Structure formats: structure tokens, C-alpha cells
Amino acid sequence: RTGLGCLTWEMYTAGFVGCSGGVVAQGKVAAASVAAVSSAVGVFARTQDRRVQVQSRGRRRAVCMMADVEELKKDVGYKSVDDYVTSGMVVGLGTGSTAYFAVERLGQKLKSGELKDIVAIPTSIRTKEQAESLDIPLVTLDTHPVLDVAIDGADEVDDDLNLVKGRGGALLREKMVEVQAKKFIVIVDDSKLVPGLGVSGAMPVEVTPFCYEHTLKRLKDAPSLAGCDAKLRMDGEKPYVTDNDNYIVDLYFEKPIADANKAAEEMINMVGVVEHGLFLDMTTAVLIAGKNGVEMKTK
């Protein structure tokens, strides 16, 4: 048996010599052998061609899906700035692939003159760098402790507009900024809607590097987090380090967190925990991008 199919004993004894130009048969069964092998070659070639076509279609579909998701993120990011930011505001700039488009839109409207006298507070180093590249004036909570609006994405949104955030690693700065905003606008695509928090992936907890294994074990054993699997987030072979030089422990659940408020309280009161990724009772509105456009949810 070869990649061309099965060779009969007669074909084998007749002898075959492969060459770049085809197959040369020798012996008394030459004609039948050539026909059989030629048929096998044809079947093999057609099969390979079909496989290539299927793989190519799959790749095109994947690229199209990615493009569609990016368009949804752009739509909802732009709309958040168009609908909620006016001249003279202090604006909180979120972090992540969806928040990126809100920052981009703010830069565009400042450059065009449509918005004026805006200052912004970024929630990560990478957002700070993006904002600076767009000439968005930046300040800090030290000088501007109250924000008019903050705009950011989320990893999960439940029916009560509670969130899981921080899979991008910026949860501490995000929460510090967004809790100070008069309005907190969350921008997501509809894949981020969940029936309960903790079901679609990691629920991040920022912890001190000092004795992080001890803190990880305490998180895993906490009654309000019963059943979770706790893993230190890695960056290659080293622990992932946040903008604040801390580590992140990712908690994984097989079913939704039973009592998110109790879990949040237990985690934040745990020595060694800096902040957690549950953003509860903070959301003003959620803009959700889907196949039918952008819809808004409020409490």
C-alpha cells in the first residue's frame, strides 16, 4: 500500500520505476498495471485537490469571521464616543481590542475639531501609548479624580450588567479609573453575553508576587469560590507581570459563580489579593454589537 492506493501482486512482480514524468511499467502486465496506477494517481490527485479546496474555504471563512468581529468592535467603539462624549469632558480610556476603537474615534474627533477641551485617563500602558500617538491630552486621577464618562470592553456581561474583566491584564487600573466615572459605558459584541459570571473563561485576580502560591491556594480554598481551578498566568516560561508589577491568578469555573457579591467581598479582603475581575454594580449602559447592529442595555 502506498499513497497512490493498493498495488496488486501482479503489479508488484511486473516492476515499477517511478520518475518525474510518470510511471513506467515493465513485464507482461504492463498495460493493465499502467491503467491501474494511472487510475489510482487520478483518484489521489482529485482527493488532494478536494482537501485543498476545503481547507482554502475554511481559511476564507475564518478570515471573514475575524473581519466581521473586528467590524462589530469598531462599530460599537465608535458609537460609544459619538453618543457619550462631548467637549469639555474627562474621559476614562479602557484597554483591549474593543476599547482600542473608542480611543481611535476620540482621537479622530479631536483632530477634526468636532470635540474640544477633552482630557483622558488611560487604564494601561498600551492605551496610554495609543492615546499619545493620537495626541489625546492625558491626565491622572491625582489631578482629575472625577470622570464624566469611562468607556471600556468586558470579557463577560450577565443579565444584570455585572462584568468579568481583566483577561487582558489591566483589571486594577481599569477598576480604579472606572469606579470614579459618573457614567461607565461598556462596549462588547454579543459573544460576551453570558447567563452567569465565570462560565466563558478565566476570572482574573491580581495578586502580589510575594508568596503568590500561598494566595493562589487561599483563593482555591475560599468557600465562595468552591469548585474553581486556580492557575498562575504565564508569559512563556515566566509569570505574567501586570503594569503594576504584580501577578495574575486566573480562576476557572465549571458553572457560574453562585454569589458574585460574596465572592468579590471574600477576595478583596484576602491579604495578598490586590484586585479581582468582578465589576459589580458599576455599569451605566452596555452597547452590544451583533448581526442586527448595535443595541443598548441599561438597568
Image (spheres, grey):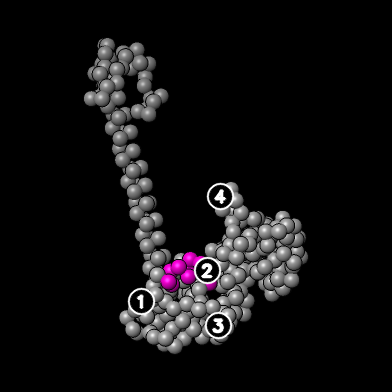
Residue 274, percent across and down?
67, 68
Q: Secondary structure at mark 2?
A: loop
Q: Which residues are magenta?
A: 123-132
Q: Return the residue at label 2.
A: 124
Q: Return the residue at label 3.
A: 143
Label 3 crowd (10 A; few <14 / some 14-19 / many >=20): few
Residue 59, percent across and down?
37, 51
Mark 1 in CB contact with mark 3 (< 8 angstroms): no
Q: CA distance from mark 2 to mark 3?
A: 17 Å
| Image quadrant assignment for residue 220 | bottom right
Q: Nearer the viewer, mark 1 or mark 3?
A: 3
Identified by mark 3, the residue type is Thr
Q: Return the residue at label 1.
A: 108
Please tell me which residue is depicted at 70% across the width and 71% down the height of the picture.
268
Quick check: 106 above or below 30?
below
Viewer-side residue, 133 vs 197: 133
Q: CA distance from mark 3 to mark 4?
A: 38 Å
Q: Return the residue at label 4.
A: 236
Identified by mark 4, the residue type is Gly
Identified by mark 2, the residue type is Ser
Quick check: 15 above or below 256?
above
Q: Secondary structure at mark 4?
A: loop
| Image quadrant assignment for residue 100 | bottom left
Question: Would you say residue 125 sits in the magenta stretch?
Answer: yes
Residue 139, percent across and down?
50, 79
Q: Secondary structure at mark 1?
A: helix
Q: Nearer the viewer, mark 2 or mark 4?
A: 2
Question: Would you say residue 172 sits in the magenta stretch?
Answer: no
Indicate which disc, 1 or 4, sits on the residue closer to the N terminus. 1
Indicate which disc, 2 or 4, sits on the residue closer to the N terminus. 2
| Image quadrant assignment for residue 109 | bottom left
